[in-house]
Amino acid sequence: MATTWMKPLHVNKGKTIAQTITDRTDYAKNPDKTWQYKYVTGYECAPRTADIEFLLSKQQYADITGRNQGKHDILAYHMRQAFKPGEITPEEANRLGHELAQRFTKGKHAYIVATHIDKSHVHNHIIFNSTTLDSTHKFVNFWGSSKVIRRLSDQICLENGLSVIKNPKPSRGHYGTWLGDKKEPSWRERLTTAIDAVLENKPADFDTFLKQLAEAGVDIKRRGDTLSLRMKTLNTQGKKQKRFIQFRSLPDDYKENAVRERIDGKRVVQKKVKPTATSSKNVSLLIDIQNSIKAQNSPGYERWAKIFNLKQAAQTLLFLQDNDITEFDILHDNAQKAKDDFNNISVGINTADSRMKEISALQKHIGTYSKTKDIFVAYRKTKYSKKYFAEHEQAITSHKAAKKYFNELGLEKLPTIKSLQTEYATLSAEKKKLYSQYHSARKFMQEILTAKQNAEQLLAYRSTAKEKENER
């Protein structure tokens, strides 16, 4: 069982960048807490000189990119991973700290792992450099990263036979500016959310949009050609936004020109989706080692398969926890529902697509019928003259083909082109909406069916093991 948190490290007040980095790394490496540095290890840096190496990479970053963020710069990130008392050795904890840091940073950032043993619970302090190893980029934090770290840590614990907290509660500790998923949304984020909400009402024009935005609780100030916005409502801490934020300083999809394009339908913005806490890896099927010929003939493959199965069992358990599935019957019902939902979406897309093809063909034949109608009427007045037919063969043949197509459809009265265009636009919008659900529904169906099959295999293995134990 492990608890985790993470916070960014800024320049401390009254200190230099070098002093700030040194203070934090010295705290992590404290010899009284790490058994005289025995449990301090590093990746792409020497633990004793990590602060100097971090500082050097930042100087290289500034030289290469020409960027310098000053006091607002994030120098490094500090992660903590605490384990249940008596469940793990310091050596093992340090190894798992490395694994957590590697998976989270993808090996692109130097870091140190310092395992503290001064408390009843063994815990890791992981400090990784915000600058990449090649000194060309910096780590970009993201919404929900604290949850990702916790889920990664949980998965690593499960893979190594350690327990996990089923219903973790937010830590009460003070994490400075980093509050994970409990972080107070910035005023800029609140404004973009308010803009999205107003645009969902599909205002007729930009003036109507501004009026609805004001009604939604946003102060609007115009100075010349410059528009500025400010939230009227208080945040959860009871604070009020003091300064106006210029419209043109908002993200690209929220600048004035972009909003005008969104109102006119010339720009489509995907709805913001909060990242889930699950690992980026999908659930994979377990390998049937007992019936695998390759495993029987290759001890190396058998060892790899056992490790692979252990990881996938952990991934399956995390998937079930994330979706609040506590019983096999619930898993069975949810898997069936996922299949039904995906099939319904597929049928809806195919039905809309088929009808859109029919409408396109019908429009084509109606157009042809209208263009050739006068020629066919004249042809009939000539009492179907061969000479007239020879002169207008293509038009007359096309007219007959269109008439035959209408008869096959059983149409007594032809629909108008405008009504067909309206129906086509409606079907197109419906198909687009279904497609937006298609990929996520397919992915979830595949994952839950895989989890169900893994659960069945694990339950069968457990049942067989119990029978053998009873026989003994």
Image (cartoon, rainbow, N blue to C red):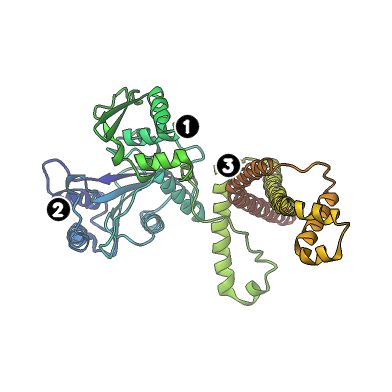
In the picture, measured across the screen, residue 320 lies left or right of residue 466, that is left
Amino acid type at circle 2 is: Ala
In the figure, residue 289 lies in which quadrant? bottom right
Amino acid type at circle 1 is: Ala
Q: Position of residue 62 (x, y in %)?
A: 19, 59
Q: CA distance from mark 1 to mark 3?
A: 40 Å
Q: Residue furthest bottom?
A: 297
Q: Which mark is residue 295?
A: none
In the picture, measured across the screen, residue 11 lies left or right of residue 408, that is left
Q: Is residue 437 above or below residue 134?
A: above
How many other residues sit within 10 Å of disc 3, few (<14), some (14-19) or many (≥20)? few
Q: Position of residue 264 (x, y in %)?
A: 46, 40
Q: Could you say which is closer to the camera, residue 401 or residue 128?
A: 401
Q: Could you say which is closer to the camera, residue 65 or residue 367?
A: 367
**Foreground: disc 1 or disc 3:** 1
Amino acid type at circle 3 is: Asn
Callout 1 secondary element: loop
How many other residues sit within 10 Å of disc 1, few (<14), some (14-19) or many (≥20)? few
Q: Which mark is residue 18?
A: 2
Q: Residue furthest right?
A: 383
Q: CA distance from mark 2 to mark 1?
A: 55 Å
Going from N to C along the chain, the mark reached first, 3 or 2, is 2
How many other residues sit within 10 Å of disc 2, few (<14), some (14-19) or many (≥20)? some
Residue under circle 1? 204
Circles 3 and 2: CB atoms closer than 8 Å: no
Q: Is residue 272 above or below residue 465?
A: above
Residue at 27%, 53% (x, y): give it. Answer: 34
Going from N to C along the chain, the mark reached first, 2 or 1, is 2
